[in-house]
């Protein structure tokens, strides 16, 4: 059981017969009133974001989720297919709505963690940092690196991101899949 003041971003709780991930949590104490924890949380089953407040009398249950190591296989007609590592017959799929913007960072054989709640697959967690090859990049111009600017490139998955001017087509770069931002160049071609 969790107390209302133990809630932090990232916690997974059972609430109203669903699983919620805490996105934001702020403690409020007003004069002559009971303190409350104001939270913004995402329902992992429906995908809806909800704001609510918890009182000192509220006892919250941590979600009991099963984590399954899986890998992305392919995408077909808006369905993203995965199989369980070590048990390829166990396959499941998700829609574009489940992923939001992270779908653009899925590539074949990418290892992910699938979350299952009460025998229902509810969510996919991508690794925070993944390496991708640059498929298209505008040419670099000598002297551009001094300005510290950036340019748009296209990754092997089709995702468009901003990278420093010194990155070229064929380079391998590390991307933060949660923010969609360039982290570092891994290998220069």
Image (cartoon, rainbow, N blue to C red):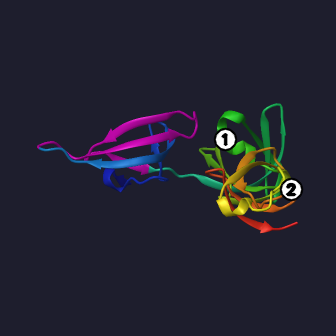
Judged from the image, the secondary structure of the residue bearing numbered disc 2 is: loop
User: Residue placed farthest to the top in the image?
Assistant: 77
Marks 2,1: beta carbons within 8 A: no
User: Residue placed farthest to the front in the image?
Assistant: 143
Lower position in the chain sequence, tag 2 or tag 1: 1
Q: Is residue 108 visible?
A: no
Residue at 78%, 60% in the rendered image: 167
In the displayed structure, would residue 78 be above or below residue 103?
above
Residue 90 horizontal side relative to residue 61, left or right? right
In which quarter of the view is residue 97 placed?
top right
Verify whether residue 149 appears in magenta: no
* Quadrant in which the N terminus is drawn: bottom left
Which x, y percent locates residue 182? 68, 57
Write down the residue under mark 2.
Answer: 169
Residue at 81%, 60% in the rendered image: 86
* Quadrant in which the C terminus is drawn: bottom right
Judged from the image, the secondary structure of the residue bearing numbered disc 1 is: helix
Which x, y percent locates residue 47? 57, 35
User: Residue placed farthest to the left in the image?
Assistant: 32
Count residues near mark 1 (Cα–Cα under 10 Å), then give few for <14, some for 14-19, many for 20+: some
Mark in the foreground, 2 or 1? 2
Residue 40 horizontal side relative to residue 187, left or right? left
Dot label at residue 71? none
Most foreground residue, 140 or 77? 140
Most foreground residue, 179 or 109? 179
Residue at 38%, 43% in the rendered image: 39
Which x, y percent locates residue 59? 33, 48
Count residues near mark 2 (Cα–Cα under 10 Å), then give few for <14, some for 14-19, many for 20+: some
Q: Is residue 52 visible?
A: yes
Write down the residue under mark 1.
Answer: 101
What is the span of residues highlighted in magenta in the rendered image? 32-61
């Amino acid at each position: 059981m969790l107390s209302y003041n133990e809630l932090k971003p990232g916690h997974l709780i059972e609430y109203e017969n669903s699983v919620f991930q805490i996105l934001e949590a702020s403690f409020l104490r007003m004069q002559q009133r009971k303190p409350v924890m104001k939270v913004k949380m995402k329902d992992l089953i429906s995908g809806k974001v909800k704001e609510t407040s918890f009182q000192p009398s509220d006892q919250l249950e941590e979600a009991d989720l099963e984590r399954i190591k899986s890998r992305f296989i392919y995408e077909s007609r808006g369905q993203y297919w995965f199989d369980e590592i070590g048990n390829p017959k166990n396959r499941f799929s998700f829609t574009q709505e489940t992923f939001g913007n992270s779908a653009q960072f899925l590539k074949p054989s990418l290892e992910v963690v699938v979350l299952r709640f009460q025998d229902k697959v509810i969510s996919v967690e991508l690794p925070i940092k993944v390496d991708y090859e640059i498929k298209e990049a505008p040419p670099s111009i000598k002297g551009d690196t001094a300005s510290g600017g950036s340019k748009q490139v296209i990754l092997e998955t089709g995702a468009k991101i901003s990278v420093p001017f010194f990155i070229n087509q064929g380079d391998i770069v590390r991307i933060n899949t949660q923010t969609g931002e360039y982290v570092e160049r891994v290998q220069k071609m």
